Amino acid sequence: MASIIVPDHFSAVEDAEVLRKACQGWGTDEKALIAVLAHRNAVQRKQIRQAYEELYHEDLIKRLESELSGDFEKAVYRWILDPADRYAVLANVAIRKGVPDYHVIVEIACVLSPEELLEVRKAYKLRYKHSLEEDVAAHTSGDIRKLLVGLVSAYRYEGDEINARLAASEAEILQNAIKDKAFNHEEVIRILSTRSKLQLIATFNRYRDDQVTSITKNLLGEEGNEFTKVVRTAIRCINDPKKYFEKVLRNAIKRVGTDEDALTRVIVMRAEKDLKEIKEQYYKRNSVPLDQAVAKDTSGDYKAFLLALLGKE
Amino acid sequence: MASIIVPDHFSAVEDAEVLRKACQGWGTDEKALIAVLAHRNAVQRKQIRQAYEELYHEDLIKRLESELSGDFEKAVYRWILDPADRYAVLANVAIRKGVPDYHVIVEIACVLSPEELLEVRKAYKLRYKHSLEEDVAAHTSGDIRKLLVGLVSAYRYEGDEINARLAASEAEILQNAIKDKAFNHEEVIRILSTRSKLQLIATFNRYRDDQVTSITKNLLGEEGNEFTKVVRTAIRCINDPKKYFEKVLRNAIKRVGTDEDALTRVIVMRAEKDLKEIKEQYYKRNSVPLDQAVAKDTSGDYKAFLLALLGKE
């Protein structure tokens, strides 16, 4: 379930007027911005952007970019975009880093539904005049490239048909690949990048039944290997995205010097999806409420904005 | 341009009535079937199927399958399906052969537009409860698998931005790969399966400028190698589909014992697209009109149907 609180009454025009006022004159009224933006869902935010454009002949996103700065600006920018556009931007930022942030690319490819991923690929082409897989392929190499290109290009079957025999045989392929330390095995890439998520979960379950430990635990011994880490992220994103995101948040907060990019990314990505459950998992695992942990590690408007997305009244 | 002749007057209900009558009683009135079906475009054929279903509570496609047989049945079946469904069926038939028919898979992946290919992937999932790339990957192996999975999973950029510098550098990569006989080079697969078609055509042109001969000619020396053949088909389908299809038709007809599957496939695939130009190319290359050549090599209702699709009044 979503964590954001959306009031019953909504008027795109009224919101646009509030935002305009908040951006005018000396300084910006960040509190007013947060009070509106952090409490509107994706459809409403889109309507507000349209109403703002019609009323003031100005692009709200560009205006906000010029008004805000730092982590707060980044968070607002990622939040206000249509989800497909947001993921296109996140993917592009991840790809263009000196060393691409493989894990963000895997997150987008493996957590989103096949239809959502397709929308991201459309948005990416429109925005960057390249296909997503084209840019991923051009900025990566070797086995990681093979895996990433396969994952972002996938358009998986979404129905509920599971083939138990296939799960058993492919669990065995994975077992042999891990035993032989052949993590770059092409069959591993094929299985992870083409099978449906339900089929893969059946395969991972079968793996655990046969091996007593889970496949992600078995991959842990290989932490030095970057490819293995990417495989592990893919498996975790497919197997249990909530658990995966809880850990990303935990690591982002526990680190010396908070990882604001990861914090922003997960909260913005999941606030309209399942951040409520992720908060519960976080509390269960850390014995500290997530909003408390976030409040301790952040400050100012950025903090206020994240807490609002986390469901603060 | 399309080769089929579609009359101005159209009524889905009238057509459904004619088809019903043609299927009733002793035997089937194939002439009446051809007179209707071969002269209706995809939208009209869909409306006829719907009208038939509403009027007679029967699936027209199933009825036709039970009435017809042999090459004629196959041709009518492929023709009457929605294009996306037709390609899904063609791809599935090609995949499930003892040795998959790689070239048909490449044709579908490289000749269709990115949006059309996406529709095929949707239709494929709906029909076969697997993704297209999943079945391709499960039935192929090695370098051919890498290339085919890349080609069918591509969702290429379709805009007209071309990067000339990139064309030059990637033409060089292709040159080196061919010189070193490293046709399975991963870079070749990356380039062919991710770049936009216009970008690739610029790359192939640059190749010809630098090397005097075309890349497809340079690949000819390697005919024994199956992977090279598949690469060549992909390049030809991207570079000049009409020329490619002319040659498929030429080979299908010239062979001892006509290749009816190829003949049907090309005529059905292109009758609403560019079969008129393919006919012109065929005549220019062979000094025999295509319909004459087809008439010589086929017979009966199958012949009458193909000729109608080729534009016979």
Image: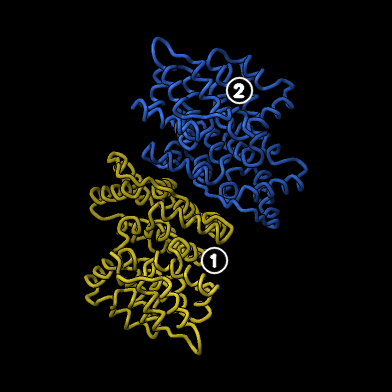
Chain colours: A blue, B yellow
User: Is residue B2 visible to the viewer in this orientation of the structure?
Assistant: yes
Q: Position of residue B143 (x, y in %)?
A: 48, 54
Q: Amino acid at mark 1?
A: Arg
Q: Position of residue A254 (x, y in %)?
A: 65, 19
Q: Nearer the viewer, mark 1 or mark 2?
A: 2
Q: Amino acid at mark 2?
A: Ala
Secondary structure beneath dot 1 equals helix
The residue pinned by badge 2 equals A252
The residue depicted at 62 percent of the width and 47 percent of the height is A197
Q: Position of residue B2 (x, y in %)?
A: 30, 66
Badge number at residue A228 = none
Q: Residues within 10 Å of mark 2 (few under 14, many from 20)?
A: many
For the N terminus of chain A, give its image quadrant. top right
The residue pinned by badge 1 equals B96
Q: Nearer the viewer, residue A245 or B189?
A: A245
Q: Is residue B130 above or below residue B69?
A: above
